[in-house]
Image (cartoon, helix red, strand yellow):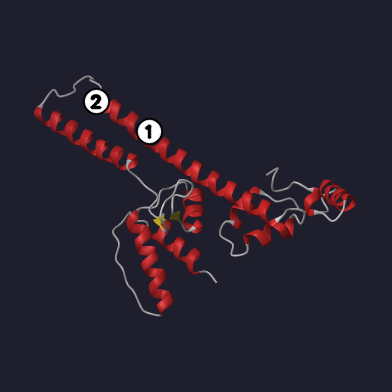
């Protein structure tokens, strides 16, 4: 936030212009770049221009750096949330593995315990093995470039809703987008809990918005 709202002399034609801009900010006569606005700039086709329109003393390279830092922050926060979910599942599994009164007292109880442990183990494994399914290899990796690209709209959606998009959801959304843009019809069926209302629908609105 400090970088985005900084009033650098490099971006001003004179010291007077810089001081006037700072005074206008202090007097609330000039807007400050908010965190929400910068996050939204991630999915803007004119993100650098949008940032400079609020803070004209920023250079294009400084605006680009702000966007890079916001993207890095989003990627890091999303991974932290995912780790926390994995920790919760791990604690639940450990709780099931600890002996307790009546644990395995009968064959039926042992079967129920084994089923619960297997289910929780699968859930934990799924959390640990989750990936960012919207990242694709776009170029040959190098020492300074992983060669990966991603659609920032998927990243912002994950960050905003504190979720990890499933591979099937990303593929379905991309299929719908490609079909709509080609002018062809498409109908799909999803089971309950697949994310029709909370993921697929909102993402399609975001990606197909004009």
Q: Quadrant of the C terminus?
A: bottom right
The mark tally for this picture is 2
Provide the secondary structure element on which disc 1 rests: helix
Q: CA distance from mark 2 to mark 1?
A: 15 Å
Say which residue appears at 65% left-offset and 59% top-offset.
48
Q: Identify the disc placed on residue 13.
A: none
Residue at x 50% of width, y 42% of height: 76
In this rendering, position of residue 89 left or right of residue 142: left
Which picture quadrant has residue 50?
bottom right
Residue 92: x and y in percent read 32, 31
The crowd level at tag 1 (other Cα within 10 Å; few <14, some 14-19, many 20+) is: few
| Among the 4 quarters of the image, the one containing residue 129 | top left
User: Who is closer to the viewer here, 11 or 111?
Assistant: 11
Considering every residue shown, the one lying at the far left of the view is: 107
Give whichever of discs 2 and 1 has the lower sequence position: 1
Q: Position of residue 107 (x, y in %)?
A: 9, 29
Q: Which residue is mark 2?
A: 97
User: What residue sits right under mark 1 in the picture?
Assistant: 88
């Amino acid at each position: 936030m400090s970088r985005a709202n900084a009033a650098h002399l490099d971006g001003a034609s004179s010291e007077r212009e810089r001081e006037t801009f700072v005074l206008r900010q202090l007097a609330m006569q000039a807007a400050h770049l908010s965190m929400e606005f910068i996050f939204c700039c991630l999915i803007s086709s004119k993100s650098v221009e949008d940032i400079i329109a609020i803070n004209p003393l920023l250079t294009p390279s400084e605006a680009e750096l702000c966007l890079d830092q916001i993207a890095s922050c989003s990627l890091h926060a999303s991974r932290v949330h995912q780790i926390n979910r994995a920790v919760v599942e791990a604690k639940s599994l450990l709780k099931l593995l600890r002996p307790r009164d009546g644990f395995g007292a009968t064959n039926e109880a042992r079967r129920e315990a084994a089923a619960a442990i297997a289910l929780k183990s699968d859930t934990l494994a799924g959390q640990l093995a989750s990936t960012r399914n919207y990242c694709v290899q776009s170029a040959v990796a190098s020492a300074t470039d992983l060669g990966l690209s991603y659609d920032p709209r998927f990243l912002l959606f994950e960050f905003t809703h504190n979720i990890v998009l499933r591979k099937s959801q990303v593929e379905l959304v991309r299929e719908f987008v490609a079909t709509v843009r080609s002018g062809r019809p498409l109908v799909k069926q999803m089971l309950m809990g697949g994310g029709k209302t909370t993921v697929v629908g909102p993402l399609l609105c975001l990606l197909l918005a004009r």
